[in-house]
Image (spheres, coloured by chain):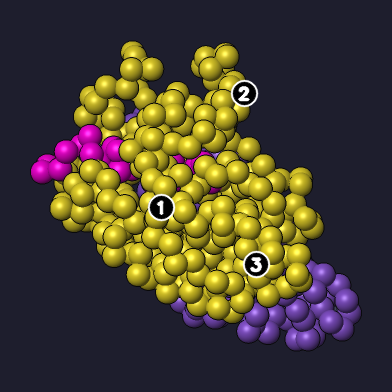
Amino acid sequence: MSVSPNNQSTDQSIHFSTSQHINFSTTQLINYTLHLADNALILGHGNSEWTGHGPVLEQDIAISNIALDLIGQSRYLYQYAADLINQSNNPFPPVSGRPVTEDDLAYLRDVLEFKNCILVEQPNGDWAQTILRQFFFSAYQYFFYEQLKQSSDERLSAIAEKSLKETTYHLRWSGDWVIRLGDGTEDSHSRMLKAIDELWMFTGELFEIAPYDEAALQNGIGVNVKELGVLWKQKVTAVFEEATLPVPQTTTFQKGGKTGIHSEHLGFILAEMQFLQRAYPNSQW
Amino acid sequence: MSTVSNHNNPEQSSSINLTEEEKKVWAILEQVADPEIPVLSIVDLGIVRSVKIATSSIPPSGGGGALITITPTYSGCPAMDMISTNIRIALSENGYPNVEIYTVLSPAWTTDWMTEQGKEKLRAYGIAPPLGKSFDQKYLEDLKVECPQCHSNNTKLISQFGSTACKALFQCNDCKEPFDYFKCH
Ligand SMILES: [Zn+2]
C-alpha cells in the first residue's frame, strides 16, 4: 500500500493562500512540511505491511486503517510541500518542465533527503514492537497536532485539525494494546520489555529541534517539540504504569533522521516503496 | 428541501438563501451515493460543504458550470477520488458538464454534520448511527450502542476499527449478532 502514482489531485487542488509567509524562508517551510510528511508516510508504509498478516482479523483491519490515515495525512503534507515548491520556484532536480507533485516527493527523493525521525523507520518486528512504535509515535503526534492547530499557517493548521481526530483514535488503540500486552501473559510482557529495549533509544529524537523547527517556531508556524517531551513522558508513564512496564531512565538517544542521517533500515524501505517509479519512470496505473 | 435542514451544518443551514439553481444542484448531489456505505448520499454524510453556480466571477468559466466544495471524512479515505468522479458524472448527466471540485480540510469533518435522515438510513441498513456529539470525548467503552437488529442496549465493543475507518465493530450480547457502529468523529 502506498500513494498511488496516478493520484495527481488535479481537480482537488486544496484551496488556500500562502501569501502570509512573507518573512519566512520558504525553503525552511518546505523542509518542515516534508519532515512531517515523511514521518507519516514511513510509519504508514511500515504499518501497511501488516495488511493480511495481522494477529487476528480485527487487529489486521485496525493497523491497516491506521496505515491509511497516516498515508492520507502524508498526502496532504506532500501536496502542500509541492505547492510551495511550485510557487516559489525552489528547485527539485528530479523534475523539470512540469509542476512537482506529491508523488514526486514520495518517490523521487533518496535516503539523505528524507527527514523522518529514526523511530518510524524501525522494523515492524513482532506485534509488540509494532504496537510500541505506534504508541510512542501517536503520543508524540497527538500533542504535536494539538499545538500545530494553533499555527499561523492556515494550511498546516487545517491539516493538524483534521489529523488530530484520527491520531486520537490511534493513541487510544495503541495505548490499550500496550496495557494488554504489558499486563498480559509472561510471553507478552517479555516481548514488550524487548520492544522497549529496541525502541526507547529512538524516542529522544522526537523532541530534538532541527533548523527548520527553529525557523518555523520563530515565525509562529511551528511547534516547540522540546516542550512536548514533558507531556509525552507523562502519557507514556501513565500507560506504562498500568501496563506494569518500567520507564527506562537512560537519556542517551540515537538521532539524525530529522536532518537526513538515517539508520540502515530506511534504504530498504525506500528501495521497495520507490521501486516501480525508479524502474519505470512516470509509470501510472 | 428536507435534507438541507441540519442546523449543525453551517453551509447547509443557509438553505433558505439558496437560489433555485443551487437547490437543483444539491438535489442532484443527494443522488450521489457514498461508495463505501451506498445507503447514504454524500449530502447525508456532510461531505458536500458548499455549492456555487459558476458565473463570470466564480470558476469554472464556460456554460453549465458549478463549483463544489467537499471535505474528506478521514485523511486516508480511499473513496474520495471516486466521490469526485461520481459528482462529475452525476452533474454532467444533469446539465452541468463543467464542474470544479475543491477539497477543504477545515473545519474538519464531523459526524455532527450527518443528517437525521442519514442516521435513520444507517439504522435501517444495520449500522448503528453515531451517538452524541463529537466533542464529548467519551471512550467508546462507555457507550451504550443499540443493536440495530434487536434494539438491545446490551452490546459490547469488539474492535475500535471496523470494516472501514469510520466504523467500529460491536457485538450484541442478546441476539449475538456482530454489527458496525458508525463512530463519533
Ligand atoms: Zn441484538
Residue A98 placement: quadrant: top left
Q: Residue A253 carries which label?
A: 1
Q: What span is colored magenta in the figure?
A: A22-43
**Label 1 CA crowd tier, 10 Å (few <14, some 14–19, many 20+):** few
**Label 3 CA crowd tier, 10 Å (few <14, some 14–19, many 20+):** many
Quickly name the residue at label 2.
Answer: A285
Q: Which amino acid does label 3 sit on?
A: Trp
Structural distance between the alpha carbons of marks 1 and 3: 25 Å
| Lateral position of residue B91 relative to residue B170, left or right | left
- Does the stretch in magenta take in A30? yes
Q: The purple chain is which one?
A: B
The front one of A93 and A191 is A191
Residue A121, position in %: x, y? Answer: 52, 42
Residue A62, position in %: x, y? Answer: 67, 57
**Label 2 CA crowd tier, 10 Å (few <14, some 14–19, many 20+):** few
Q: Which residue is drawn at 33% across and 13% down?
A: A97
Q: Which amino acid does label 2 sit on?
A: Trp
Residue A19 placement: quadrant: top left
Q: Which residue is drawn at 82% across and 78% down?
A: B172
Q: The yellow chain is which one?
A: A
- Kindly identify which chain the residue marked by label 2 belongs to: A
User: Main SS of the magenta segment?
Assistant: helix
State which tag comes first along the sequence, 2 or 1: 1
